[in-house]
Amino acid sequence: MKQLLQSYRTGALRVEEAPLPALRPAGLLVRNAFSLISPGTERAQMELARASLLEKARQRPEQLRQVLRSARQEGWLTTYRKAMDRLDTPVAVGYCSAGLVLEVGAEAAEFQVGDRVACAGEGHGSHAEVVYVPRTMCARVPQSVPLEHAAAAPLGAIALESLRQANVELGERVAVVGLGLVGLLIVQLLEAAGCHVLASDVEPDRTRLARELGAEATCDADHLETAAELFTGGRGADAVILAASTRSAAIVETAGRLAREKGRIVVVGSFPIEVPRRLYYEKELTLTLSRAFGAGTYDPEFIERGRDYPYSYVRWTAGRHLEEFLAQLARGRVRAEPLLTHRYPIDRAAEAYRLLEDKAARPLGILFTYDLEKSVTPAPLRRAPPVRPAAPEAGLQLGVIGCGKFAQTYLLPHLRRRGVRLLAVATATSASASHARRKFGFLEAGCDAQALIDDPRTNCLLIATRHDLHARLTAAGLRAGKAVFVEKPLALNEDELRQVAAAARDTGGYLQVGFNRRFSRLGRRAREFFAARQGPLVMTYRVNAAPLPGHHWVNDPVEGGGRIRSEICHFIDFLQFLAGAPPVRVYAEAAGSATSPVAKIREEENLHITLHFADGSTGVITYTTVGDPRVSRERVEIFGDRAVVRINNFRTANFHRRHRFHPVWLLQQDMGYRDELKAFLDGATRGHMPIPLEEILASSLAALRVLDSLNQRRPVEVDWNRLA
């Protein structure tokens, strides 16, 4: 299928052939008939993408802080590569479309194949022939509404949400400043709600159109205050809705002068917000920001899992705003046709965006059209005739499932080597699949993980999806006869771990988990340093981690499993590697208040874990997110046989024995990613697992037992043999 993508590094746009997106249970695949450019949002995205690195950093200070922290921890070369990887990743453009339902997910039974729907949301209502959209971010289109008009429904939902925030009532006098697509829709909705509307813009053509669409009064920007004085009889506007896009903060002060005492001001457009306190204080004004389509817009539960809010408690969600706007179109209370000024087939997207930048043309609604007669192939990966899986001695035929930022930065660059054929990549979105194929040289790309597992041409899989899929895909890959590398964690619960253990044992399959630290140069050297020891080791591992937002997907109990499951397994495995023995008992204690509303997150982010190993060695892991980010992220100390090793951030190390001191410095941090991939590929070729299955299971089970210990507040035994 064709899809429009944008480079975040240069701002360049291109239409390319991409695989069909994957159908998820809580959504639909939709064959787009039309998609609509949102001029303000997409023009701003282009300007940011075309900006210099310095300007990007200025506009995104939080991301700059992340880059600086990464540079301190990992070194400038690694950080530069990571930043460039992110800038090179293309972005799917657009968020307003309408078309026909192609396939229906198991949890979206209220829709049927062939339904006419409007689709909203970044990454969902994109400029593409086929899109995936969650059930909560789409709505059926009434038969009387043309699909080209329905493509404006997401902008209509934004306009409706601004009215909710303004809390307008019949008969109120409302000023609308900024008459782009959203502003003109706001004007019509206010008129339909029985409000008296004053509309203003810098463009005379826009103000004339606003009057045709229902505004009682219009004016240019220079005469706005005078016009508002006359329009309101000197009382001031009940509400002012700011739908303009400007780099000046003066619009906020102007809105304050337009409003009456105790008036409401709603921000919809994009501009700096600098509130003149005296003006707003003396009038006791209310300033509100209207957030996109309405309730649920940025909620992962609502978007990714399609979990709608109860109708009785949240009357107006993003999806219900779509429905209502389409209903207003069907009743003729709102008109979209006057706003749609240009149409282009998706192949001519470059022309459309050149027009968007033409200040003389000043287009309003630019539609992309799609050929509904063109066939689309639902299978994202080519299927070969059924044959037995290729033998390892014939060379590795590699398939990759999951290609996010971590995989692209730390894993995929190390796969290019002799004897390895990068056959196919399957990842969640069409854009990332196409980008990975082009960047890393895969022969094929798609979005169907199961198709890649079933493909008899592959004999080797790398799995780097989000955590909830690891165990299921790993077990399926092993039972399909593939050698499997899966990024940590292996499983999120004991049942999943038992399923993987059974698949590995039943098939005798080759399995490796992404416990990379045991493959680091300093880690291997530390183990060799203590190879001839006579007694146990006493080990400490301090992790000064960055805190994650509460809504981060890693903290999601279903998808990410939390930081203990997703990260602590790393450190347990490294201590197991150093000791050369499995953990047999764990005891965990957390910092933080149990009465805190975010106690569960803090508990998993700030704790001490004591481990006992089968050879008598002990280890203490201190994991915290409340430290100074300028201090190194990881520090390991190992004591034994009157010797000490200190490893600082896997970049420097000190080796002490019998009063002798030997320092080691590396130019760049080495966390072992390159060598773990080399070991996996070499081992898959020879049929030798670099990490014994018992150690994989022991580390993974010990991480789950940390949670048990926290909950039970006592030491918990670790017996990986019970996984049989």
Image (cartoon, grey):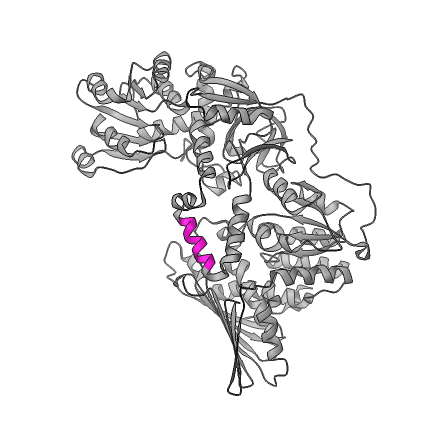
Give the prevailing secondary structure in the magenta stretch: helix
Rendered view: 657 above or below 362: below
Residue 545 magenta:
no
- Name the residue at 21% across, 37% down: 276
Q: Residue furthest top?
A: 212
Task: Report if residue 537 is visible in the image.
Answer: yes
Estimate the x, y position of residue 631 in percent, counting from the top left: 42, 65
Front-most of 348 and 281?
348
Magenta span:
62-71
- Decide whether residue 66 is among the magenta residues: yes
Q: Which image quadrant: the C terminus? A: bottom right
Q: Nearer the viewer, residue 706 or 390?
A: 390
Task: Give the residue displayed 46% in from the left and 41% down from the top.
Answer: 299
**Looking at the image, which residue is at 53% across and 88% down?**
658
Res. 539 visible in picture: no
Locate the N terminus and report the quarter of the image it occupies.
Answer: top right
Q: Is residue 658 above or below residue 698?
A: below
| Residue 584 placement (x, y as % from top left) | 59, 73
- Please provide percent x and percent y for residue 491: 61, 57
Residue 11, how many percent across, how many down? 50, 36
Q: Nearer the viewer, residue 437 or 218?
A: 437
